[in-house]
Image: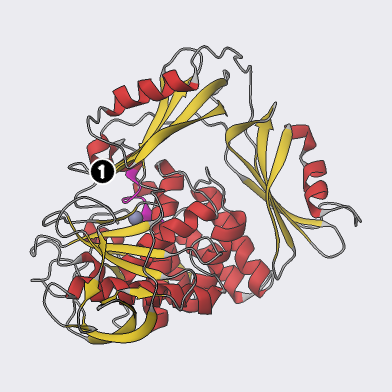
């Protein structure tokens, strides 16, 4: 959730990647029945596109889902992903082909990994320490008629005016910067305390009484819930920028001071979000393996933002005018956590249309979480913590993105370079489509029959898990969402019809 103060706005100039072609989804009975392993079936189908290695193979209600990474001599091709769904008879039913055309690969590698990292540090220009030291990976970068080897270098900076996680693509032959974007991610994991589980009570940011799990160790009750996945932990940054801060400790298990409120909300909303994903989609935390959910509150001073850095959610206190404590809103907490799920599933690149889909999916599933939990549901994002002095407004509106200056139709999309190519702006177009699918309505002369919020969420969650790829664009999203609706409800179901119409209404074909 980064709009008002945004690292991406600071980024300024963006080099638009010259990736050739977008994902194409085909469905039907694409191959004859086969006894071969699903991975073999999918690899066989795309073998004319180059070499591939398996990155995921799992079963779901439709069939076996196989994800492949395109490679050249073992080196991964940026954005080159193929997804196949194979049925019980060993027939390929659906394929998303996002293999890149690697033309005239320039084989020169002059830069070492070490030099690429040194050049990255110079370009980022950060003088202090890195939370996570930059790491470089050699990749093949498709670039129109001339593909090149490049280093994809990423480092995380947290102790700075604005935390950031820059990814740079540096030509391994010439040292030229091919592309860059900023997305916070992976930081180091944290450890809790050993003790006994208790139930604590407290008052949250919105003034509601809450109960939650704590762990007693020594003479303190810690905000550590050891009953869910590998645990839910809430930390106090004490208005500094050192992360994660210290595990929240309370003497009597009653958190009722004003300072406690941000922590109560963070802890309770992380719990609710964990339960939402577990109960609705059977997902055990963001990695689906119970990864610990860490939250830090009271980050920096009057900080008007929240972010996910790969192992934890970090919340500012807000300045009291634009924002109050950002952990106060369930949809904001679920938004941040959904970014983590996206990293572990579709891996949508955080710029241009794939970045706008990444943002929209966080708004959409954050809103579905809010609906599912059943308190304060609306189609606004962040309304509970945005401008505490003004009632009835939010950070974005899914029902009416234009009310906040965001586009609600593809013809109105932002094509500039700010905000990583408009990731928080063009998300409005997708948000509107999701709103129309869930709620129903007429837009630009197209009327869409609503399928309900939960069904809309099921469809988008499946699209995120199965069919979206790192460089999916809006057109690939339409295909992914429509196919997901067909998978879940049937090819000619009202849900599938509405899914297609919701994209007609916003001009995405
Ligand atoms: Zn976001």
Residue 146: x %, y % from top left: 57, 18
- Foreground of the two, 82 or 473: 82
Q: Residue at x 52, y 60 (%)?
A: 287
Residue 195: x %, y % from top left: 38, 77
| Residue 428 appears in the rendering | no
Residue under label 1: 7
- Relative to 389, is 54 above or below? above
- Foreground of the two, 140 or 509: 140
Q: Is 60 left or right of 179, judged from the image as shown?
A: right
Residue 305: x %, y % from top left: 22, 56
Q: Residue at x 79, y 36 (%)?
A: 47
- Relative to 409, is 174 above or below? above
The span shown in magenta is 422-430
Residue 446: x %, y % from top left: 46, 65
Q: Is 351 left or right of 342, judged from the image as shown?
A: left
Q: Is mark 1 on a helix, strand or loop?
A: helix
- Relative to 191, is 154 above or below? above
Q: Where, by quadrant of the figure, is residue 315 drawn?
A: bottom left
Image quarter where ligand 1 lies: bottom left
Q: Is mark 1 within 8 Å of ligand 1?
A: no
Q: Residue at x 48, y 15 (%)?
A: 111
- Foreground of the two, 106 or 53: 53
Q: Residue most toward the front?
A: 218
Q: Is 142 left or right of 399, judged from the image as shown?
A: right
| Residue 297 appears in the rendering | yes
- Foreground of the two, 61 or 285: 285
Dividing the image into 4 quarters, which one contains the N terminus?
bottom left
């Amino acid at each position: 959730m980064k709009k008002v103060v945004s690292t991406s706005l600071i980024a300024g100039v963006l080099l638009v990647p010259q990736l050739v072609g977008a994902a194409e989804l085909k469905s039907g009975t694409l191959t004859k029945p086969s006894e071969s392993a699903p991975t073999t079936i999918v690899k066989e189908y795309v073998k004319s596109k180059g070499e591939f290695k398996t990155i995921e193979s799992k079963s779901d209600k439709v069939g076996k889902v196989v994800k492949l990474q395109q490679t050249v001599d073992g080196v991964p091709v940026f954005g080159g992903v193929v997804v196949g769904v194979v049925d019980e008879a060993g027939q390929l039913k659906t394929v998303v082909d996002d293999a890149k055309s690697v033309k005239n690969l320039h084989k020169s590698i002059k830069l070492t990994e070490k030099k690429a990292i040194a050049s990255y540090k110079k370009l980022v220009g950060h003088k202090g320490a890195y939370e996570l030291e930059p790491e470089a990976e050699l990749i093949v970068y498709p670039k129109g008629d001339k593909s090149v080897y490049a280093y994809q270098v990423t480092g995380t900076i947290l102790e700075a005016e604005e935390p950031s996680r820059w990814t740079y693509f540096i030509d391994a032959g010439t040292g030229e910067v091919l592309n860059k974007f900023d997305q916070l991610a992976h930081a180091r994991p944290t450890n809790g305390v050993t003790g006994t589980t208790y139930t604590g009570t407290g008052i949250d940011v919105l003034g509601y009484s809450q109960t939650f799990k704590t762990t007693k160790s020594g003479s303190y009750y810690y905000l550590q819930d050891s009953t869910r996945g590998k645990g839910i932990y809430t930390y106090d940054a004490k208005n500094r920028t050192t992360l994660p801060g210290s595990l929240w400790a309370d003497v009597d298990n009653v958190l009722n001071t004003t300072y406690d409120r941000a922590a109560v909300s963070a802890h309770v909303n992380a719990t609710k979000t964990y339960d939402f994903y577990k109960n609705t989609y059977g997902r055990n935390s963001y990695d689906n393996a119970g990864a610990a959910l860490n939250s830090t509150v009271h980050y920096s001073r009057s900080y008007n933002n929240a972010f996910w850095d790969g192992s934890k959610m970090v919340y500012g206190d807000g300045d009291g005018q634009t924002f109050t404590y950002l952990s106060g809103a369930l949809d904001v907490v679920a938004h941040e956590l959904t970014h983590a799920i996206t990293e572990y599933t579709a891996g949508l690149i955080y710029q241009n249309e794939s970045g706008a889909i990444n943002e929209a999916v966080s708004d959409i599933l954050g809103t579905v979480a809010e609906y599912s939990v059943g308190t304060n549901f609306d189609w606004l994002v962040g309304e509970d913590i945005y401008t505490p002095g003004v009632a009835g407004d939010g950070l974005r509106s899914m029902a009416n993105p234009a009310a906040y200056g965001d586009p609600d139709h593809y013809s109105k999309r932002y094509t500039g370079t700010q905000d990583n190519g408009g990731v928080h702006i063009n998300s409005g177009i997708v948000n509107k489509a999701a709103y129309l699918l869930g709620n129903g309505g007429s837009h630009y002369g197209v009327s869409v029959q609503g399928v309900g919020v939960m069904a809309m969420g099921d469809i988008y969650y499946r699209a995120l898990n199965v069919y979206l790829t790192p460089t999916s664009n809006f057109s690939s999203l339409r295909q992914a969402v429509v196919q997901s609706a067909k998978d879940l409800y049937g090819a000619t179901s009202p849900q599938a019809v509405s899914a297609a119409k919701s994209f007609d209404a916003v001009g995405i074909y």
